[in-house]
C-alpha cells in the first residue's frame, strides 16, 4: 500500500506533465522543463513526506483551485487532494519591508512538490506551486536557475529586466533564463502558478 501523499503527489505530477505537454509543448522552456521532470525519481521508494504546514496565503487555495478547473481540470482535482499535505513556505530573503508592501508575507506562499521540502527530493530540480494574493507586486528578483512558470489561476502582468509589463492569462507559460531579473503584478484575483527550476536550484531568489 502506498501513502496518501504519494498517490496524490503522483496524480499532481502526472496531471501537470500531461496538460503542459498537450497545451504548451514547444513554448519557450516547456520541453526542457518536461525532460527534466521526467528524469526525477518520484517512485514510492523516493518519497520524502513533507511536514504539512499552512500559511496565511493558503486561504486563497479554494478560490485558485476552483479557477484552475477552467484551464487544467485534472491539475485542479489533484491540487485539491494534495494541498493539505504540502509544506507551504516563504523565501527567508523576503519580508514586508524588503518587498515594500505592508501585507506581502500574508499574501505569499510556495510549496515544493519536488525539492528539499517536497514529496520527492529531486536531482537539482524543483517543481512547486506559487501563490500570490490580489494586487500584490512581486518586485524584480533573479536567480541562477532557469525557471518555467505556468499560470493556473489569476490574470497577472509580467516583465523581464526593465521592459514593459505584459498581461498573461491562466494557461500561459513564462520562461526565465538564468539571472534575468523578473517581476510580477497580480490582478484582482489571487494567482496560482506551477513552477519548475530545471537546474542550479541551490541558490534562492534574491531581490535586485
Ligand atoms: Fe523567478
Image (spheres, helix red, strand yellow):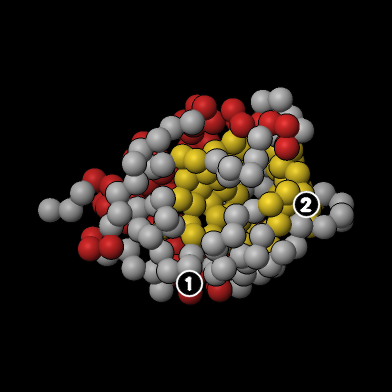
Drawn side of residue 112 relative to residue 189, left or right: left
Marker disc for residue 159: none
Above/below status of 199 relative to 78: below
* Of residues 63 and 82, the one drawn nearer to the viewer in this rendering: 82
Residue sitting at the far left:
1
Quadrant of the rendered structure where residue 160 is? bottom right
Which residue carries the number 2 mark? 208
Give the residue pinned by disc 1.
Answer: 36
How packed mark 2 is, by other alpha carbons closer than 10 Å (few <14, some 14-19, many 20 or more), is few
Residue 30 percent location from the top left of the image: 58, 68
Q: CA distance from mark 1 to mark 2?
A: 27 Å
Vertical placement of residue 128 versus 125, above or below: above
Q: Position of residue 83 (x, y in %)?
A: 39, 40
Percent of width and height locating residue 90: 55, 41
The vertical placement of 39 against 45, above or below, is below
Q: Residue at x 34, y 41 (%)?
A: 51
State the image quarter where residue 136 is shown: top right
Q: Earlier in the sequence, mark 1 or mark 2?
A: 1
Rendered residue at 30%/49% (across/down): 49
User: Image quadrant of residue 150?
Assistant: bottom right
Q: Is residue 152 visible?
A: no
Image point 58% across, 42% down: which residue? 92
Q: Residues within 10 Å of mark 1 (few under 14, many from 20)?
A: some
Q: Nearer the viewer, residue 50 or 186?
A: 50
From the top left corner, tell me how far across and down residue 54 is, in percent. 43, 32
Amino acid at each position: 500500500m502506498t501513502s496518501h501523499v504519494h498517490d496524490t503527489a503522483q496524480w499532481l505530477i502526472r496531471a501537470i506533465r500531461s496538460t503542459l505537454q498537450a497545451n504548451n509543448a514547444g513554448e519557450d522552456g516547456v520541453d526542457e522543463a518536461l525532460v527534466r521532470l521526467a528524469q526525477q525519481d518520484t517512485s514510492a521508494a523516493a518519497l520524502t513526506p513533507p511536514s504539512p504546514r499552512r500559511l496565511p496565503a493558503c486561504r486563497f487555495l479554494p478560490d485558485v483551485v476552483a479557477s484552475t478547473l477552467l484551464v487544467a481540470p485534472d491539475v485542479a482535482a489533484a491540487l485539491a487532494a494534495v494541498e493539505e499535505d504540502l509544506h507551504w513556505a516563504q523565501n527567508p530573503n523576503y519580508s514586508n519591508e524588503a518587498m515594500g508592501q505592508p501585507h506581502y508575507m500574508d499574501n505569499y506562499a510556495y510549496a515544493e512538490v519536488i525539492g528539499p521540502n517536497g514529496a520527492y527530493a529531486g536531482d537539482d530540480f524543483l517543481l512547486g506551486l506559487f501563490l500570490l494574493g490580489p494586487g500584490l507586486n512581486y518586485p524584480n528578483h533573479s536567480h541562477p536557475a532557469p525557471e518555467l512558470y505556468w499560470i493556473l489561476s489569476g490574470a497577472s502582468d509580467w516583465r523581464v529586466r526593465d521592459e514593459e509589463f505584459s498581461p498573461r492569462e491562466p494557461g500561459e507559460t513564462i520562461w526565465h533564463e538564468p539571472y534575468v531579473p523578473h517581476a510580477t503584478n497580480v490582478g484582482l484575483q489571487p494567482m496560482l502558478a506551477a513552477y519548475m527550476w530545471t537546474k542550479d536550484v541551490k541558490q534562492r531568489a534574491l531581490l535586485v
